[in-house]
Structure formats: C-alpha cells, structure tokens
Image: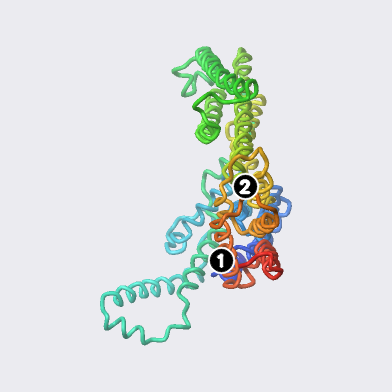
Amino acid sequence: MKTNDILMLIATAAYSYLFYYQSPGINFLLFAVLIIVLFFLKDRSLIYRPAWIAVAAGTILSAFFVFWWGTALPVLANACSLLALAGFSFDAESSFLFAVGNTIAAILIAIPRLFHSTVEEQQPEDKTPRILKKLLLLIAPVLVTLLFVAIYCNANPIFAKFVDQINLDFINFNWAIFTLSGFFIMFGLFNIYRFKVNESDKNASDTLRLITAEEHVQSGSGSWLSAPNELLMGMVMFALLNLVLFTVNGLNVFYMWVINRLPEGVSVAEFLHDGTDTLILSIILAIAVLLFVFRGYLNFAENNRWLKMLAYTWIAQNALLVITTANTNWWIIQSSGLTRRRIGVYVYLALCIIGLTTTFIKVAKRKTNWFLFRKNAWAFYAVFIAGCFFNWDEIIVNYNCKNYKSLELAYIDRGYQTELSYTCLATLYKYYVAEKKEPAISKKIFTGPVINAMHSNYYYLQKEVAEHGWQSFCYGKYKNLHQIENMVKSGEVVN
C-alpha cells in the first residue's frame, strides 16, 4: 500500500473517531493538527511554500477558535481552510481560488473516480490504488444488498419479522455510513484531480503585457470598435457615472452630516437595509465595468490620462458611498442596538473597500483582471480568519445591555438576545442578576419570556455537554456552564 493511501486511511479513522456523534470542540483542533502533519509527511517541501504555510496557520487558528468558542463562524472558516490546505498541498503555486476549487471538485468526483477505474487520469500517481478498488468491489455489493433488504422488509411483513429476529446490534449502520462518507472526503483531500486549466492559473501573470494598437485591431473587440472610439466611449461612460454618483453622495452628505437627519417618510432602518444590498451590488458592478474597460489596450493608449482620472474619481466616490453607509449603520445601532446583521454590514463594507483598493491598484499598475481575483481571495480569507478572534454574540449582548438604559438606545429586541449562541449565556445571566438588585426601574430588559428562554437555553447547554464525549469539549461551553452553575449554587439564579 502506498504512503498516500496509508495517510488517507489514518485521516479517515481520525475523522470517524473525532466527529461521529460529536459537536464542534477540541476535535476540530486535533484533526487540523493531524491533517497538517499528514500533508507534511506526504510532501516535506511544503514547509518552504508561503501559501501553504499561510493556510496551515489559518487552519490552526480557525480550529483553535472552534475549540475556544464552538460557534458557526470558526467552523466555516476551518472548513474553508482545510479545502485550501488540501489544494495547496497538491499544488502550492496555484491561486487561492483554484486551491479551494480543485479540492471541492476532487471531493465531488471522488465516488466516480473510485467506482469507475476507466476514468482517465492525467498523472499515474492519481490512479486509484488496487487495494482500494478491491475493497470497493466488496463494499458495493454489500450496500446494494442492504438496500434491497430494506425494500423487501417494507414490502413483506413476514420477511421483516424474520429480519427483526436476527441480532445485528453489533453493526452500527449510522457509523458505517458516516465513516464511508468520511472516506470519500479524505480521498478527495488526498487525491486532487489535475485539470488542464490549473496550468493556466499557475502561468498567469499579475502584470499586463504591452498591447500595441495593431494587436488591439486584430483582437475581437478591436475588429468592430476602434481604439479612439473605445476610449471616447469609456470617458463618456465614466463621466456620466461620476455625475450620477456625485448626486447620490451629495444628497447623503447633506442629510447625514449637514442637517443630520433624513427626509420625511424615510426611516434609518429602511434606508440602511434596503440600500446595503444594492450598494454591494453597485460596487461589484462598478468593479466589473472597470475590469471591462481596462482589460487590454486602453491601459497603454497614449491619450488615456483623462480616462484613468475619471476611473480614479469613480473609485473614490464609491469609497465615499461606503463611508456614508457605515455612518447610517452606526445611526441605527445607536437607536436600536447591535445585531449580527449590523456587524455583518461593516464586514461587507470592509470587503468593498478592499475590492475598490485592489481595483485602483489594478488600473494604476496595469495589472491583469486575474490579479484582482487572486489578491481579493486572499484578502477576503484573511478577513474570514480575523473574524474568528472575536466572540461577536458576547459583544452584542454587552453593548445592548450596557446602553439600553441610556438615552441613546431607544429600543432593544429582548427576544433577540436569547436567540444568540451559548457563548453569551453567562453574560446574559450576569446582567439579569444585576438588574434584579436594582431598585424599581421602568426600563427592564429581562421580562418573563426572556428569563424563560434563558433557562431553556441553559437546559439545552447542559444536555448537549452531557450527551457528547471528550471530543466535543469546548472551552466556551465549559466556561458558560460553570459560571451559570456557580450563580445557581449561590442562589443568584433560581433555575
């Protein structure tokens, strides 16, 4: 058996042992460390590859915060990191997008590659090992037989009664299916399929090569649109777009920073929620227009100075639009409290700024369109990992509870606080205990339904911890549970 097959089977066994019937916790951290070690044993030269090192660090960090918080964000970040890690382990010189895409494709086609030995492979080492083929030749008939047994049991009560008398307690079908699915995933991670497009990705340059006027004429667009006409069209388009966006920004600045209020009939929430998605779409379209205009010859045209100035102005105006939207988001946070969506708005706006910055670099430095996608993918991944460092739900609860009784916060969604994850449950109880100790107050946070929901969340947290093994140990769960139990023992909280 080849080394790669042994490593793959070790990963499958670890996957089954660490994750079957478990919740996110220390299992993610242990599995991340193991996978990194296995990939390193497979190819020791990876330690000298910056992209692989960066993603390995992201994998460890995201897995650590799964253990620390146990929330969805680090789980998703860790899954993305593992996909990229496998891709870079296969080809450390590929782009981030191709690293993730190659791994996803390898997982999706794992079953066809395993069961159909006639699938054409481009590399000899990618071929399915004989021992695995023989193993699958045994597994396939067993699975088909079990399927028909289930069908006959459903169709024939006599046969069903006969099968019930057979003691199959020693077989855990759920575990078998889970482990088999894990094997297919590990096969995809350790046997990336090499597509021809990968070479194009590796050989793609970040900088545009010089394109002459003659080459432009011979190109597809140049054959029906001359360079002077294309330059004129670009200038007219950016001039009109700048005029429209100048009007939008002018109105925003006037109402937000000059008279500091919105027009009658327009609420802050309506302005923000209805406008944010459209804003993001407009910036994506703006970047797409810039990519189209500066895709080739116009980067090198002699009279493109005004075209570039108009493009830079439009980028700057889009950045101003992001700033005014961020200010509007802050208005609604001050009046109605902090939520995940409102934090998400800032994240989206930060990503927009990153996209506009790389677009500016692309135009100014005559970079290729692929440069934009490569750099933005890494930047977005860095933001993804950075978001794992914070306990966002606890930040939300702390902000809302501290500011609720102030004049700034006019409204709070009490029920929303109890819909957040368990990572803020102990904090909610602390504010509940503090509110009980205060004299008669008119603005209460913890009403009857809120308290009942907190107790229900506490019960489910206890149940979840009790039902899972050490693989699911999560510091955030332990910390919150321990703090609440201490409040119950001291009599501060009556459960």
Name the kind of residue labelled 2 in the image: Lys
Residue 144 falls in image quadrant: bottom left
Image x and y of residue 432, in percent: 65, 57
Residue 19 falls in image quadrant: bottom right
Left or right position of 204 against 439: left
Image x and y of residue 169, in percent: 45, 83
Q: Tag on residue 64?
A: none
Left or right position of 88 against 169: right
Q: Nearer the viewer, mark 1 or mark 2?
A: 2
**Element carrying mark 1:** helix
**Element carrying mark 2:** loop
The residue at 55%/45% (across/down) is: 198
Label 2: which residue? 443
Above or below for 144 versus 289: below
- Can see residue 47? yes
Question: Are the residues flagged by discs 1 and 2 in contact, CB closer than 8 Å?
Answer: no
Pick the front one: 289 or 489: 489
The residue at 50%/52% (across/down) is: 105
At label 1, counting other C-alpha atoms closer than 10 Å, the crowd grade (few under 14, some 14-19, many 20 or more) is few
Left or right position of 247 against 62: left
Above or below for 272 versus 399: above
Q: Residue furthest front?
A: 440
